[in-house]
Image (tube, rainbow, N blue to C red):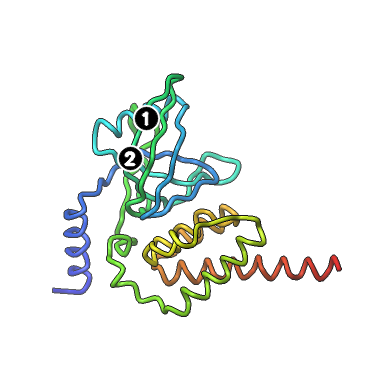
Amino acid sequence: MSLLLSLFFYYNLTMMKLNLPRIIPIFPLSGVIFFPKTSLPLNIFEQRYLTLINDCIKSNKYMGMIQTKSNNSDVYSIGCLGKITSYKKTKDGRMLITLTGVSRFEIISEINSDNIYRQFEVSYEKFLQDHEQERNVKIMPEKVKEIYEKTKLFFKKNGLLLNWVEFGKLDVDQKINTLAMIAPISDQEKQMILESIHVDSKTKVLSEIIEFYLHENSADKIILQ
């Protein structure tokens, strides 16, 4: 059996085990980056997305989050599938939900339908590592320690607080995803991290971005003095 054919069967077997949908409703939202193994609280009030949430709850509870591009309705090609793990209707008609990240996906094509929200056919093939256990993560411990120290300094300089004790209980991938979500960096930079395939590449990109900001702040301080 050829390598290509072996990878094809491995991918399809993995998708069958995970039972992830190939066609998903999408919630496009600017400025919000969502990662696997993280939780995202959402306050839904627009009618099209209330309909989306209600339809999801009635079916498999899966929906995709994806970032819109600046100044238009286009979306990036990479987003994250989430599952609604809690929801509550408010008296004024809003819906408060918690979305738990499952897997990143790549858009194949948009589906034409009568729904008032957008739907896409997606592939999870690039991001099979999102479903692997931490024991398969080969990132070097010193690299992990290095980025934590950089992040602590970066957060402190920006007046951000994080419960580092609770944070320490997460696995490596969760830690990198969480830092990428909450770090005060640009949406485009967060998208770069989201699109990095493996946890080691995500760590490298995040580390370089934070290093840039730390260096920029130091340079600004020298100029002001």
Residue depicted at 60% across the width and 60% down the height = 155
Residue depicted at 34% across the width and 72% down the height = 137
Q: Secondary structure at mark 2?
A: strand
Residue depicted at 22% across the width and 68% down the height = 7
- Mark 2, other Cα within 10 Å: few <14 / some 14–19 / many ≥20: many
- Which residue sits furthest top? 92
Q: Which mark is residue 203?
A: none
Q: Quadrant of the N terminus?
A: bottom left
- Which residue sits furthest right? 225
Badge 1 amino acid? Lys
- Residue 199 or residue 123, whichever sits in front: 199
Q: Which mark is residue 84?
A: 2
- Residue 72 or residue 205, whichever sits in front: 205
Quadrant location of residue 71? top right
Q: Secondary structure at mark 1?
A: strand
- Residue 172 or residue 208, whichever sits in front: 172
Q: Which residue is mark 1?
A: 88
Badge 2 amino acid? Ile
- Residue 217 or residue 155, whichever sits in front: 155
Residue 66: image location, x then y, percent: 44, 46
Residue 23 falls left or right of residue 217: left
Q: Quadrant of the C terminus?
A: bottom right
Residue 79: image location, x then y, percent: 41, 50
- Which residue sits furthest front? 165
Residue 32: image location, x then y, percent: 51, 46
Marks 1 and 2, Cα distance to the nearest angstrom? 11 Å
